[in-house]
Structure formats: structure tokens, C-alpha cells
Image (cartoon, rainbow, N blue to C red):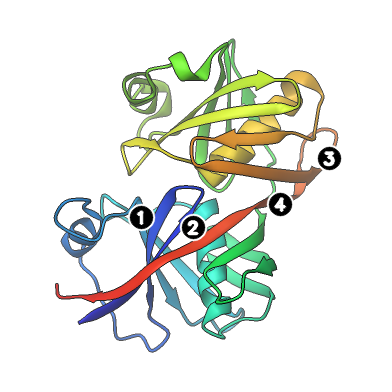
Amino acid sequence: MLDFEKYHGNGNDFIIINNMDGVVSLLKKDIQHLCHRHFGIGADGLMLLEPDENADFKMLYYNSDGLLSTMCGNGGRCIAAFAFSHGYAGNKMKFNAVDGMHKAYIIASEPGGSLFDVSLGMSNVEKIIENENSYFLDTGSPHHVEFVKCAEEIEVFSKGKEIRNSSQYQPGGTNVDFVQIDTNTLYVRTYERGVEEETLSCGTGVIASALAAYLETGIKKWRIKTRGGNFSVDFKGDSLPFTEIWLRGPAKMVFKGGIEL
């Protein structure tokens, strides 16, 4: 029996498994099965919480395709809440991920410990490519950011898939963000590589959108909306590199259980 907890960060959902004792070993097909929304638990991704010599823990993140992936901002916030709730870290913590060390803060948690307000420190952004109608940058994961007049009118799956697989982003592909700018507000919709669908939110995509919007408008502070909920992003720097990047939003434990593989 494999014990797990299901979390989501503004609708971006994850299976989290405690592997601090190192006994869990999952194959690609196992992860695909667990993340399948009809035949498994259902999730955009799966994470293992593992020990680390230089931090409170290590985060291993897999997309629903079963492959190890680049950094996931919402996943990082959710696994921070998971580690805090299980006593592996205090409300201020440090953890190791695929792109290096991250700090995280549990700003608040509701009684009973199922809803958390989490701020996550992200990697510096040192390079942004500006194209005619878009920006490309790596915020822990690669993102193509495109500004649109009305995000709700965009066919995110078809257009996102086309851009994700376009020759300019091969061989690795990219995540794709469609961003609508309104007064004090960004509305972001994201096609996620590795999930190969639109997700209800994407943390690294929200950061990429905020940085691109700053270059586009000169405005740093935005209310950032996604289909799954709201975020805030803070960063330092008036030009590259952008440092001290923080992603803040909710992390929610939905349910826990056990499953036979």
C-alpha cells in the first residue's frame, strides 16, 4: 500500500509521497497511472519528499507523463506545506530542487492544517529573449509568454500545443502562457509541457508573466489571476538580472489515502 496526500495550489494539483526513509521507488508507468484522472488518483504531477544533507528536504517532481521535470512553483509551495504539516520543517525552511536551493515561508495556516498561505523563493532570472510578439525566459522552467487582448477567447490547448512543439523551442519544448493585461491585473492561462494540457494555474508561468509584463509596461505590482485562483509575485531589479523572486499563494491539502500499485 502506497500512502499519499493530494494537494493543489490554485487548482494545479499534485500527489505527494513521503519518501524520507527512501523505500519508495516508482517507475514511469507507475507515475503515469497514479496521475491518470480516470484510472488513478489524478494529478498534474507527482512529488517525492526525500532527505537532503544540506537542507530540510529534497523535492523530486514528475509531470503526469511520468518524467522528471524542471522546477514547479506550485509544486514547491505544496511540498513546503506538506513538509511543515509533517514536522520536517518549520515555518521558515530551505529545500533542494532540480534547479538548486529554495527558501519557503508558511505565512499562515488554518486550524487543522489543510490550507496554507505559502511564499516560495525562486531562482534568479538572468536572461530574457524578446521576440516580436512574445518573450521567452526560464523561471525554473522555460516559458513562452504572449500578451493577448482577451485570454478567454484563446484556444489554449491547440495554440499552446503548436507553440510548445514549434521548431524554435526544440528539442526540449516550452510551457506557453497567454496573458491579458487589465488595470492592475494580469490574467494568465498556461499550456504546460509534460502535462500537455492547460492547467488551472502554473507558478513558474505566473512569475514569467509578471516579469514579462514589467518589461512590457514598467509596472512591478500586479494582482495575478488564473482560472484556479490568485497569486502575487515580488522581485528585485529594474533590469536583468531579476533577483529575490517570490511566488505567494495558497496550498491546500485535499485528501489523503493509500493505493495499491
Looking at the image, is mark 4 or mark 3 nearer the viewer? 4
Helix, strand or loop for disc 2: helix
Residue 169 at x, y percent in the picture = 42, 28
The Cα atoms of the two marked residues, 3 and 1, are separated by: 32 Å
Tell which residue pokes out farthest to the right in this image.
Answer: 238
145 or 82: nearer the viewer: 82
CB atoms at circles 1 and 4 under 8 Å apart?
no
Q: Earlier in the sequence, mark 1 or mark 4?
A: 1
Q: Name the residue under label 2.
A: 75
Q: Which mark is residue 164?
A: none
Helix, strand or loop for disc 4: strand
Q: How crowded is mark 3: few (under 14 residues within 10 Å), some or many (20 or more)?
A: few
Q: Which of marks 4 and 3 is nearer the N terminus?
A: 3
The Cα atoms of the two marked residues, 2 and 3, are separated by: 25 Å
Q: How crowded is mark 2: few (under 14 residues within 10 Å), some or many (20 or more)?
A: many
Q: Which of marks 2 and 1 is nearer the N terminus?
A: 1
Q: Earlier in the sequence, mark 2 or mark 4?
A: 2
Which residue type does callout 4 highlight?
Answer: Trp
Residue occupying image coordinates x 19% and y 59%: 40
Q: Which mark is residue 237?
A: 3
Q: In which quarter of the image is the N terminus?
A: bottom left
CB atoms at circles 2 and 1 under 8 Å apart?
yes
Give above or below for 145 relative to 23. Answer: above
The Cα atoms of the two marked residues, 2 and 1, are separated by: 8 Å
Which residue type does callout 1 highlight?
Answer: Gly
Q: In this view, does 222 lie to the left or right of 26?
A: right
Residue occupying image coordinates x 29% and y 75%: 257
Where on the picture, by quarter, is residue 116? bottom right
Q: Residues within 10 Å of mark 1 (few under 14, many from 20)?
A: many
Residue 149 at x, y percent in the picture = 57, 11
Q: Mark 4 points at which residue?
A: 246
